[in-house]
Image (cartoon, grey):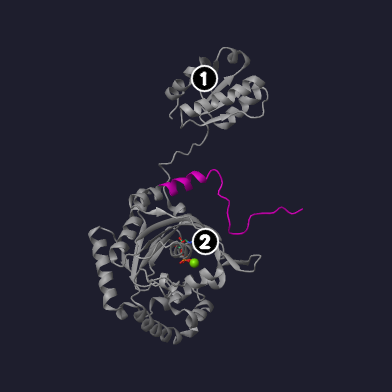
């Protein structure tokens, strides 16, 4: 029978990799706590209609990347391709947004049926951050400064920041017309994707990843000259804060998000070390989204970090790579095995950072020593019949020639503290 394998683009994260993930997650969540953001946990599956309404039918994500299926009552459900939609839904459903400021974050897997390649998977992971209720550029700056702090604590200095302002909806409408004229007059140079976008979502052409499209995109008209004065002022105030905080950035007038309720500030953090999949973090203002879901108008901004891409960049020098147990407990015979379980529990009470692996399944001491050696443990604690009657254990140094010793149970925790770096 053919073996069943994991789905293309959906990866197992194995034991040798999980410490890096944990380190990354802990580093980032520690910073989120510094800014007093609160975690929200939202379902992985939502109604398809939520994403259609939030992200928009004319986007790549909704038109070709979603994993959607009918559940038994025939409602279409979708594995979430991103977290903002669910976060907004939950915020409205629980009355978290009305006349309140909320600063939230979430972490978890997202699903998009894209062509798998380096830095692009079908199940990938994001940490998302959203802030509701703040209209001014101060919160935009807070998000960007927070990202800068993530990179700082992860020792990443080669991530650059690009920012832009998308203005208000009138500004974008004017710009859209200009763009359609421009790209229509060069329609012979458009690839298939861009032709579709030209009629459905012309701003998205600027987001094309096709290198052959770049000269045309790079020569396209930009939005800045159509910006409304309030957006110009908002953007200027954001830049002032970034300048005074010493955050370097480049204004990229072609940086867009092809969704209608994204306006004003958008930003991306990009690494040049990741090839075409260089955007590690993307975000922006979506002041129109909450109202678009039928709730009262609420300013909002958020960003999401692609954790696989960040993982490929992060420096894990500070991370101890040894996850082996410190101690392997060998037990000879039934009664030693019964007592050994309790002894190990007692040591876990006394030494919370000790990693102790108890032998399972009995076996001769010779076999148990072999397993102890393979486990990578520093020390073997041996509980034989003789030690059991005397309330003692024998200790063998597995990684040196030091002679075996015997100590009392009451002395074990002091001994281990003195001999191990725990
Ligand atoms: P891209 O332009 O790379 O397709 P996007 O604009 O679709 O990204 P967003 O929806 O803004 O991405 O998601 C935020 C971040 O999540 C991205 O910057 C990236 O780091 C990560 N990301 C998005 N899609 C994937 C994917 N398929 N695999 C891995 N990471 C992803
Ligand atoms: Mg994408």
Residue 397 appears at what percent x and percent y? Answer: 52, 22
Image quarter where the C terminus lies is top left
Q: Secondary structure at mark 1?
A: loop
Q: Secondary structure at mark 2?
A: loop
Name the residue beneath numbered marker 2: 120
- Graded by Cα atoms within 10 Å as few (under 14), some (14 to 19) or many (20 or more), the crowding at tag 1 reads few
- Graded by Cα atoms within 10 Å as few (under 14), some (14 to 19) or many (20 or more), the crowding at tag 2 reads some
**Viewer-side residue, 405 vs 48:** 48
Q: Residue at x 45, y 75 (%)?
A: 204
Residue 262 appears at what percent x and percent y? Answer: 39, 72
**Viewer-side residue, 422 vs 79:** 79
Q: Main secondary structure of the magenta part?
A: loop
Mark 2 Cβ inside 8 Å of ligand 1:
yes
Left or right: 266 in relation to 14: left
From what the image shows, is residue 369 above or below residue 154?
above
Residue 358 appears at what percent x and percent y? Answer: 58, 28
Q: Residue at x 67, y 21 (%)?
A: 334
**Viewer-side residue, 21 vs 89:** 89
Please give the label number shown on residue 401: 1
Residue 59 appears at what percent x and percent y? Answer: 50, 73
Are the residues tagged 1 and 2 within 8 Å (C-beta)? Answer: no
From what the image shows, is residue 180 above or below residue 144?
below
Residue 3 on the magenta segment: yes
Residue 167 seen anywhere in this rendered image of the structure? yes
Please give the label number shown on residue 253: none
Q: Earlier in the sequence, mark 1 or mark 2?
A: 2
Left or right: 148 in relation to 412: left
Q: What span is in magenta?
A: 1-26
Left or right: 321 in relation to 367: left
């Amino acid at each position: 029978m053919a073996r069943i394998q994991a789905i293309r683009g959906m990866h197992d994260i194995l034991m040798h990799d999980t410490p890096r993930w944990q380190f990354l997650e802990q580093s980032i969540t520690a910073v989120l706590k510094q800014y007093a953001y609160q975690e929200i946990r939202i379902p992985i599956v939502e109604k398809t209609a939520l994403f259609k309404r939030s992200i928009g039918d004319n986007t790549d994500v909704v038109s070709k990347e979603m994993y959607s299926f009918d559940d038994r009552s025939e409602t279409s459900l979708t594995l979430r391709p991103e977290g903002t939609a669910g976060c907004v839904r939950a915020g409205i459903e629980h009355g978290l947004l009305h006349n309140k400021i909320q600063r939230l974050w979430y972490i978890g897997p997202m699903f998009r049926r894209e062509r798998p390649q380096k830095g692009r998977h079908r199940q990938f992971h994001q940490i998302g951050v959203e802030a509701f209720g703040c209209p001014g550029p101060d919160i935009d700056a807070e998000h960007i400064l927070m990202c800068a702090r993530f990179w700082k604590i992860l020792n990443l200095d080669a991530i650059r920041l690009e920012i832009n302002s998308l203005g208000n909806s009138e500004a974008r409408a004017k710009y859209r017309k200009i763009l359609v004229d421009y790209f229509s007059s060069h329609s012979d140079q458009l690839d298939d994707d861009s032709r579709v976008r030209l009629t459905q979502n012309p701003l998205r052409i600027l987001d094309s990843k096709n290198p052959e499209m770049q000269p045309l995109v790079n020569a396209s008209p930009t939005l800045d000259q159509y910006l409304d004065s309030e957006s110009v002022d908002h953007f200027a105030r954001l830049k002032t804060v970034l300048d005074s905080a010493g955050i370097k950035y480049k204004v990229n007038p072609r940086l867009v998000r092809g969704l209608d309720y994204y306006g004003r500030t958008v930003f991306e953090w990009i690494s040049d070390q990741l090839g075409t999949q260089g955007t590690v973090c993307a975000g922006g203002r979506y002041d129109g989204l909450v109202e678009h879901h039928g709730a009262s108008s609420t300013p909002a901004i958020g960003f999401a970090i692609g954790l696989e891409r960040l993982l490929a960049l992060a420096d894990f020098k500070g991370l101890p790579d040894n996850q082996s147990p410190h101690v392997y407990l060998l037990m000879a015979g039934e009664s030693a095995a019964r007592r050994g379980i309790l002894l190990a529990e007692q040591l876990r009470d006394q030494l919370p950072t000790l990693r102790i692996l108890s032998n399972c399944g009995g076996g001769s001491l010779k076999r148990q020593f072999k397993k102890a050696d393979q486990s990578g443990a520093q020390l073997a604690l041996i509980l034989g019949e003789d030690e059991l009657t005397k309330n003692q254990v024998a200790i063998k140094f597995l990684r040196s020639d030091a002679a075996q010793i015997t100590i009392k149970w009451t002395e074990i925790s002091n001994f281990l503290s003195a001999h191990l770096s725990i």
